[in-house]
Image (cartoon, rainbow, N blue to C red):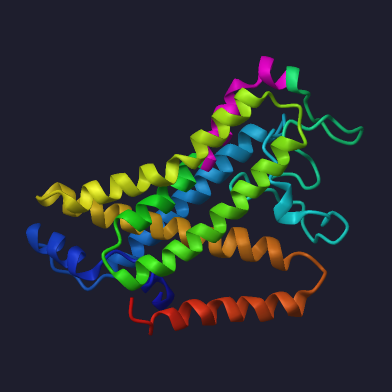
Amino acid sequence: MEFLVFFSPNPARLQKVLSLGHISTDYPLAETIVMLGFFMTVFLEQLVLTFRKEKPSFIDLETFNAGSDAGSDSEYESPFMGGARGHALYAEPHPHTHGLSVQELSRSSPLRLLSLVFALSAHSVFEGLALGLQEDGEKVVSLFVGVAVHETLVAVALGISMARSAMALRDAAKLAVTVSAMIPLGIGIGLGIESAQGVPSHVASVLLQGLAGGTFLFVTFFEILAKELEEKSDRLLKVLFLVLGYAVLAGMVFLKW
């Protein structure tokens, strides 16, 4: 549970909420809230995958795993970081798949469209909340770097997929604007909660910080690491860069911002 401290709500804020409710406990409530956020993210992902079971998603962030079909150890697909590998957004169906054309998607799959946009948007909102609710300046910088890198990959993947597809420019723009607006929205909500006074704002801040931390926990270990380490190529090189990435972020703690 020690690892969860980085993702946990502000201890002072949590203690203040508990004192306002005249609650005294040694139970690790902060870490528990983070795990609730983690399980919530797992539930949302599996809910979206359930909708995709019979009719696959039109969102495929292929650049996360470009050219990895032959080297993959798993066929698991996630709606948050990318779908079926090697297929473009609104891709034309291949003989071995059950893909749908643009016309079929626009005519018969509004539920899948909304569910997948919701999945990406909800994920981005919680990333924004993590930034907006953060009071520690050092953590803000570390989180900002992580969010910026992650969202850059998402944006590039979406852009390439839409460029290779027959998706209408207006529809592509709507999708891009919707997803890209979610992080600023989350930051705004977080800042609004932090600036508000009273018990409800403190409770909301603690809960949302923990839930956002759970989202980061899920993305780190189930999305990024799992999808990278399941590939058969350059395994040791990936481990090396994993350690280097951690070392860089750990070193940022000692910098004065």
Residue 87 among magenta residues: no
Kindly report the secondary structure that dominates the magenta region of the rendered protein. Answer: helix
* Residue 10 vs residue 25, the one in the foreground: 10
Residue 182 pos. (x, y %): 44, 41
Q: Quadrant of residue 207?
A: bottom left
Say whether residue 208 is left or right of residue 219.
Answer: left
Residue 52 pos. (x, y %): 66, 34
Measured along the vertical axis of the image, is residue 36 above or below residue 171?
A: below
**Residue 82: in sight, yes or no?**
no
Residue at position x 69%, y 33% in the image = 58
Measured along the vertical axis of the image, is residue 133 above or below residue 58?
A: below
Residue 253 pos. (x, y %): 39, 80
Residue extending farthest to the right is 95
**Residue 241: in sight, yes or no?**
yes
* Residue 127 vs residue 257, the one in the foreground: 257
State which quarter of the image contains the N terminus.
bottom left
Say whether residue 216 is left or right of residue 160.
Answer: left
Residue extending farthest to the top is 107
Residue 106 among magenta residues: yes
Residue 69 pos. (x, y %): 84, 54
Residue at position x 17%, y 49% in the image = 201
Say whether residue 251 is left or right of residue 12.
Answer: right
Region rendered in magenta: 104-120
Residue at position x 30%, y 69% in the image = 137
